[in-house]
Image (spheres, coloured by chain):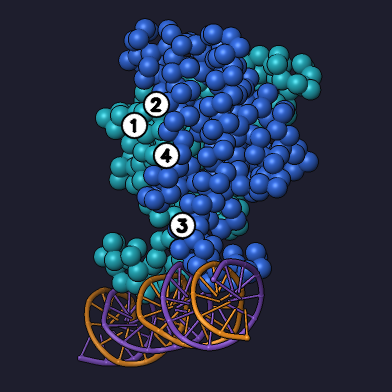
Chain colours: A blue, B cyan, C orange, D purple
Amino acid sequence: MQHGFEGTSMRTLTAKASVNLAAVNYHFGSKDALIEAVFRRRLDPMNAARIAELDRLEAAAPAPSAEAIIRVFLRASLAMIEDVKSGGRNFTRLLGRTYTEPSKPIRALIGQLYAPAMARYKSAFERALPELPKDELIWRMHFMFGTLAYTLAATDTVQLIAGCKPEDRYDAALLEDRLTAFLNAGLVAPLHGVRGVRKAA
Amino acid sequence: MQHGFEGTSMRTLTAKASVNLAAVNYHFGSKDALIEAVFRRRLDPMNAARIAELDRLEAAAPAPSAEAIIRVFLRASLAMIEDVKSGGRNFTRLLGRTYTEPSKPIRALIGQLYAPAMARYKSAFERALPELPKDELIWRMHFMFGTLAYTLAATDTVQLIAGCKPEDRYDAALLEDRLTAFLNAGLVAPLHGVRGVRKAA
DNA sequence: CTATCCTTCAAACGTTCGTTTGACTATCGG
DNA sequence: CCGATAGTCAAACGAACGTTTGAAGGATAG
C-alpha cells in the first residue's frame, strides 16, 4: 500500500513480517504468486458476499431499486475498511490502488475476480433502469466503480487538496450513505445535455 | 504509465527516448527530479487554464450553476486526452494513476500543484450550492475528483469488467457530457438517507 | 531409533537498479 | 584560431533486487 507492488522488496516485506526471506519462495513460489494469493484471499470472499447480498435482495423484493442495488454493491467493499484483522484500510488502499495498476498479470487477475459480480450487477441495474441505454449504463457503472475505487485508495493527499481535516475518520456506515446518495443520483441522472445519445435503448 | 514510476528504469526510459543514460542525471539531477519536471510541465498550465476558465465563467455570469462549474473543471483535464503531442491519453493515465500513488514526494507535489485550483472551485461550488453543508460538499468534491481520476487512469481492465467494447474510443466532448451529467446529479443530490447529516450548513 | 519428509535459515547467485566518472566532442565569444 | 563552456557518451560503481542453494532443525510413521 505504501510503496506499490514493484516498489516493495521481499526483504523489507519479510523483515516486517518477521519471517525468513526464502520462506516466501518456498511457500508461494514467487513474489507475483504471493500478491495473487493476497488478493484472492480477500477478493474471492468479498465478491461472493456481494453476489449473495444481491441474491438476497432480489429474493426479498422482485425488482429492487437502483439505490438498493448500489447500497449492497458498496457494502461489500466498505465492509473491508472496518475489518481490521483482514488488513482494514490498508488493504482497501492497496486494492483501490491496484484497480489502476497497469501491470498485466495483476490486471488480468483483478478483472477475472470481479467479472462474475460485475455481470450480475449489470443485469440487475438493467432491470432497475430499463429506460437507460445500455452503453450509458456501462459508462455510469464505470464512473461508479471509479468513485468507489478512488475513495478506497484515497490517501490523505487529495483530502488535503479538498481541505478536509484528518479528524474525519472513515466511518463505513456514513460513507455508505454518502456514496449511495451521490452515486444513485448520478446513475439515474437525466440524459439531456449528453450530445449524440439517443434517449431510449 | 505502463509500469509505474518505480517500475520504470532509467535504462529503458532513455533507450525508448533514444538518449544517453547519463543525460538525465546531467540535465535533471535525478530520476525524482525528472518525474517532477514531467508533471510540472503539464499540470501547471492545466491548472492555470482551469482557474482562468472559471474566472471567465464568473465574469460572464455572476452566479454560474454547479453544472457549468463542473463542466469547466472537467474540461481542463479532458482536453489533455486529445492533446496528442503532450502525451495524450498516455499522460492522463499516468496522471490518474499518480493520484493514488502513495509515494511521499510525488504526493506532496501533486497536492501542491492542485491546491490553488481546488480552493477556487470549492468556493465557487459553495456559492452555487449554498444549502449544501460544507463537509458534505468536500466529500462530494472528493467523489467527483475520484471519478475523474479513475476515468483518466482507466486501463482496458475495468472496462472489460463492465463488458465495454474496445471500439468505444475516448471522445473528450462526449466524455465531458457524460461525466458532467453524472457528477452534477451526484453533487446536487438530496441529502435524505444520509445518516447523521444535518440538513443545512 | 531410524528414515523420511517438511520447513527454516544464512549465505550466495546473477541481474538490474540509479548514479557517477572521466574522456571526448561540439559550440562560440573574443 | 583558441580557450572555455556545455553537452554527450561508454564504462563502471556500489547497492538492492528476486531467487536459489545446501546445510541444519524438527516432526512423525514404522
Q: Could you tell me how far apart the alpha carbons at marks 4 and 1 are, in whole angstroms? A: 20 Å
| Residues marked 3 and 1 touching at CB (< 8 Å) | no
* Residues under numbered marks 4 and 1 in contact, where contact means CB atoms less than 8 Å apart: no
Give yes or no for contact between labels 2 and 1 (Cβ–Cβ under 8 Å): yes
Which is closer to the viewer, label 3 or label 2?
3
Q: Which mark is residue A43?
A: none
Tell me the tag on residue A111.
4
Task: Please state which amino acid type lies under the numbered disc 1.
Answer: Tyr
Give the amino acid at mark 2: Leu
Q: Which residue is mark 3?
A: A33
**Crowd around label 4: few <14 · some 14–19 · many ≥20 (10 Å):** some
- Label located before the other in sequence (4 or 3): 3
Question: What residue would you read off at disc 1?
Answer: B170
Neighbour tally class for label 2: few under 14, some 14-19, many 20 plus, Cα within 10 Å:
some
Q: Which residue is mark 2?
A: B175
Amino acid type indicated by mark 3: Ala
In this rendering, which labeled residue sits more in front, label 3 or label 1? Answer: 3
